[in-house]
Amino acid sequence: MSDLVLEARDVRRTFMVSAGFMRGKRPLHAVNGVDLAVGRGEVLALVGESGCGKTTLAKMLLGLLPPTSGTLEIDGNPIGSMDRLTVAKTVQPIFQDPYSSLNPRKSIGSIITLPLRVQGDPNPDTWRRRAEEMMELVGLPRRVFDNFPSQLSGGQRQRVAIARALINRPRMVICDEPTSALDVSVQSQILNLLQDLRAELGLTYLIISHNLAVVEHMATRVAVMYLGRIVEQGEARAVFTAPKHPYTEALLESVLTPDPHLGVPDTHLGAAYPNPLDMPSGCTFHPRCAKAMPQCSQVVPRPIASIGGHVECHLYDETEGQLAS
Ligand code: SF4
């Protein structure tokens, strides 16, 4: 992959948190050695359960949180060396809830042009025209320029949030559950809009989602995160059709419910998500893994290269991520 927009090398973020009454503070390794590389025009989906470190990683990519160690680069420039405004010009977020992410007291025009004002754009006489062009691009009628968020539907509000994120033409957009707060009827419209905008503006996306249907619809590559590490990464088609890591298999099984009346399918994840303050030894997934072997609780699996990515699991050996014999 030559034209990298984002590269993360051994990125870690540790928080010191209280371990309980009279027990002092202990390190919580929210992101624990992440390597990622996202090329121009790719859609990388980051999936995993709540608390796996996705949000912490996204905050670091947005320059809102410095890594404890490791390197994060956008366009070859370390994020740590960029000021907040430069990062904001390069990477923009789209949040899941357009109801709370838009200021209800500001007009739509004011919301969409906010990044231009914050960045001190030198051509204020062009702001309205640029906002209206962006509104047209995201499918918003120009007549709502002076309206307020409460006068719009949920889908329209998410289009406002997208227009605001794109008005400075960022290189990369981080979409955090971009449709989860929307009616099912408009979810696919917003996903299709994001796809169209990617093609038209040459955008690169990092999509954070629990919804594997969204991931399958959008992603070119998938990274599966568990307890602060990327345990499997690969081309989306390969991950969906032939998942390697038992955790990825369990995540995929969990959405393949043939009959909703049967309840939650058996994903072999009966054991609760581990306490990140008390990480399991060896492979951190071993207490929940249906395929665990004796060595799994003792030895940390190393990343094994697979087609278009890697997998961290003792089931695989160095031969292009083949099953170990
Ligand atoms: Fe399961 Fe062992 Fe692979 Fe971990 S290393 S995912 S416990 S088989």
Image (tube, rainbow, N blue to C red):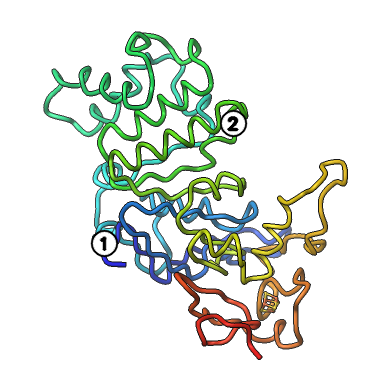
Looking at the rendering, in which quadrant would you find the N terminus? Answer: bottom left
Q: Is residue 12 left or right of residue 265?
A: left
Quarter residue 3 falls in: bottom left
Residue 55 drawn above or below residue 273:
above
Disc 2 is placed on an element classified as loop
Of the 4 image quadrants, the one containing the C terminus is: bottom right
* x and y, in percent, of residue 304 in the image: 52, 80
What crowding class fits label 2: few (fewer than 14 Cα within 10 Å), some (14-19), or many (20 or more)? some
**Badge 1: how crowded within 10 Å, few (<14), some, or many (20+)?**
few
The amino acid type found where label 1 is placed reads Asp
Lower position in the chain sequence, tag 1 or tag 2: 1
Say the numbered circle drawn on residue 101: none
Q: Residue at x 55, y 74 (%)?
A: 311
- The residue located at (60%, 46%) in the rendering is 213
- In the rendering, at what x and y percent does residue 268 appear? 80, 64
Residue at position x 50%, y 30% in the image: 189
Which of the two discs, 1 and 2, sits closer to the camera?
1
What residue sits right under mark 2 in the picture? 181
Front-most of 74 and 30?
A: 74
Tell me if 267 is positioned left or right of 190 in this view: right
Picture quadrant of residue 49: bottom right
Image height of 318 relative to 214, above or below: below
Q: Determine whether the beta carbon of the residue marked 1 sits less than 8 angstroms from the nearest atom of ligand 1.
A: no
Hey, what amino acid is under mark 2? Ala
Quarter of image, ligand 1: bottom right
Label 1 to label 2: alpha-carbon separation? 33 Å
**Element at label 1:** loop
The image quadrant that residue 199 belongs to is top left
The residue under label 1 is: 3
Q: Residue at x 35, y 67 (%)?
A: 71
